[in-house]
Amino acid sequence: MDLAQLTRLAEPVVAAAQRRLPPDVRAAAAAVPVCFEARPNAALLAEGWEPDILGMFVGHGHLAEFAESQPLPPQILLFLENIMDYAEWDEAIYRDEVRLTYLHELGHYLGWDEDEIARRGLD
């Protein structure tokens, strides 16, 4: 499957996850775009990110002010080929992992640390 096909599978999963969020979290989630990419780009790899990372949040968090140390606008990146590899090309597992990865990265946007993300079952 190519990126377009993987994106067509992922988009409704993310939309459904957003609809299931509590209203206050849903409003915050609507403010952060989700970008679907095949794999991390060379710049991310040069920064030391693992090539098989499933997703990441970049930019300033939900209630944080813009800072020069975070010059990018907030966004969630989902690396769909990596997620499909992780799912071993099983579409049901892929959809579940897209949902879980999205929610995990949304947690980072909301300012939750790894412990809070784990407590909420999003690790």
Image (spheres, rainbow, N blue to C red):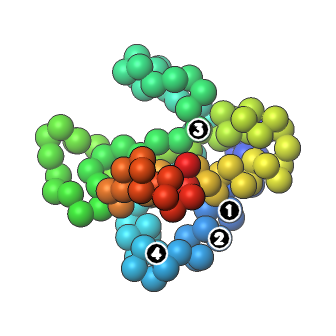
**Left or right: where 123 falls relative to 46:** right
Badge 2: how crowded within 10 Å, few (<14), some, or many (20+)?
Answer: few
The residue lying furthest to the bottom in this view is 23
For label 3, the residue is: 54
Q: Residue 29, how many percent across, how many down?
A: 44, 67
- Identify the mark at residue 16; answer none if there is no mark: 2
Q: Nearer the viewer, residue 37 or 26?
A: 26
Dot 3 or dot 1, earlier in sequence: 1
Dot 1 or dot 4, earlier in sequence: 1
Dot 4 or dot 2, earlier in sequence: 2
Answer whether residue 79 is visible to the viewer in this image.
yes
Position of the N terminus by quadrant: top right
Q: Residue 38, how many percent across, how many down?
A: 62, 35
For label 1, the residue is: 13
User: Which numbered disc, 3 or 1, marks the residue closer to the eye?
Assistant: 3
- Identity of the amino acid at label 3? Leu
Q: Quadrant of residue 84?
A: top right
For label 4, the residue is: 26
| Mark 2 touches mark 1? (CB < 8 Å) | yes
The residue lying furthest to the top in this view is 46
Q: Residue 72, how many percent across, how many down?
A: 28, 43
| Mark 1 touches mark 4? (CB < 8 Å) | no
Q: Residue at x 72, y 55 (%)?
A: 96
Q: Secondary structure at mark 4?
A: helix
Answer whether residue 8 is visible to the viewer in this image.
no
- Identity of the amino acid at label 2? Ala
Dot 3 or dot 4, earlier in sequence: 4
> How far separated are the C-alphas under marks 3 and 4?
22 Å
Q: Compared with residue 41, is residue 95 higher up or lower down, i.e. above or below?
A: below
